[in-house]
Amino acid sequence: MQRVFLVHDGNYSGSHEKCEGVVSQTYTSGRTLQQLLAKTSTEYLLVVAQSQELQLGQAALERMIGVMEQTSAGMCFSDYVDVKNGVRSEHPLIDYQFGSIRDGFDFGSLLFFSMAAIRSALTNYGDIDDVDVAGLYDLRLKVSVDHPLFHIQELLYTKVESDLRSTGEKLFDYVDPRNQAVQKEMEKVATQQLKRVGAYLAPKFTSVPTIDTAFPVEVSVVIPVKNRERTIGDAVQSVLKQKVDTSFNVLVVDNHSSDGTTKVVSELASRNPCVKHLIPSRHDLWIGGCWNEAVYSEHCGRYAVQLDSDDIYSGPDTLVRILDTFRSGDYAMVIGAYRLVNMKLEEIPPGVIDHKEWTPDNGRNNALRINGLGAPRAFNTALLRQVRLPNVSYGEDYAVALRLSREYQIGRIYEPIYLCRRWEGNTDAALSVEKANRNDFYKDKIRTIEMLGRQRMNRQGA
């Protein structure tokens, strides 16, 4: 008797002699999955989620079945061998956790479900939603409420990779305007999951408190920098060109650069009194820690505005646009839009990143599903001093934005006011699998912390 039912699309060419099977071109739709599940009489369901040539490893299905039986998992997934341009390499994945709510979580190509867990989840939380492409996402979220999704750290299959783009090229797929309908479906599914687990926030906000603090200027632009001799001068000059009706400065936190960065910043500061060259006494700081050095310094203004040392403001009105937005509403933070450009300032795909998926009512819930919120980011300094950024160099801005949005409204600017310059020195241009995994795991951890905090807030407010 067959124990596994296999679902895949028409492009799958792997071995599946031990499975019953069905081919479907739309297996991720809610309707198709419901129909497939209705005819599934096996103990397990194996979904081939990506269309590549696959080869199961020795006793791979038996190993998955054994793990499922021993762990009572609702689903398991495994590491695999990647073949790119004929070269074989190990491709590790990361563990699933409470905050792994994003629709882009990488399970690899094989998702091995317990049919008992699926039936329990659909009984408790309703049928798979009637969506065109987010059905599999809805199913795994519902299963995950009461059953672990277990990561097997073994290479159980080989996959021939067809997407050969670098990490930096894949980074912005989720904000491609062509995917807006898909994103709306994913948002709907994710929001329902947050409601199921008690982490959903209704559109009710705390007023930004009035804090009687004297600030030396109205606006400070914060630029953490280390070894960016080639780009830091452009970044600072784009601040000095700002046309604003109030006082401002630029706080360059030089994290002990070993190239010519320190000399460039020192010369800029000597010629421009509003440029403050800050060199921390500590040697254990990352980007978040450098931000804290600036925010807690005596030079920091009422509002602190981000500018990465690689990038520049798009024109002389960037700070004006941010200040006008702060003044137009009760906002703890303002986030703008940016344009991707090369070092010649020529637009490169996908162009403008505006994060229009953010809505005033549901933005802070949907923020848990996606990997970023946009740039530049600007903060009410008094509130930022209360929450403090984590001392890391990836996800520090995402963490503090989620934390502030838990209580306060976030203002948005959807027109590009910032130029994000992509070049070979960008830290996310082409990450190794291990570094990408570390980043993804950390952001999931941020989501876990935030969702637990929201659960706690909801319980206290009940």
Image (spheres, rainbow, N blue to C red):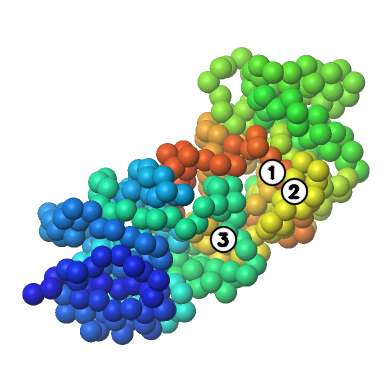
Asked if disc 1 and disc 3 are in contact, CB closer than 8 Å, the reply is no
Relative to 93, say whether 6 is above or below: below
Callout 1 crowding tier (Cα within 10 Å): few <14, some 14–19, many ≥20 = many
Percent position of residue 389, x then y:
56, 36
Circle 3 sits in a helix, a strand or a loop, which is it?
helix
Residue displayed at 85% across by 33% down: 237
Q: Amino acid at mark 2?
A: Val
Q: Is residue 143 left or right of residue 161?
A: left
Residue displayed at 66% across by 16% down: 258
Q: Is residue 369 left or right of residue 10?
A: right
Nearer to us of marks 3 and 2 is: 2
**On residue 241, which mark appears?**
none
Q: Is residue 45 left or right of residue 384?
A: left
**On residue 341, which mark appears?**
2
Question: Residue 174 occupies which quadrant of the picture?
Answer: bottom right
Choose between 123 and 110: the one closer to the eye.
110
Which callout, 3 or 2, points at the residue further toward the start of the chain?
3
Choose between 99 and 52: the one closer to the eye.
52
Percent position of residue 161, x then y:
43, 55
**Residue 330 visible in the picture:** no
Residue picked out by circle 3 = 174
Circle 1 sits in a helix, a strand or a loop, which is it?
loop
Residue displayed at 33% across by 60% down: 54
User: How many numbered discs, if any?
Assistant: 3
Which callout, 2 or 1, points at the residue further toward the start of the chain?
2
Asked if disc 2 and disc 1 are in contact, CB closer than 8 Å, the reply is yes
Residue picked out by circle 1 = 422
Q: Amino acid at mark 1?
A: Arg
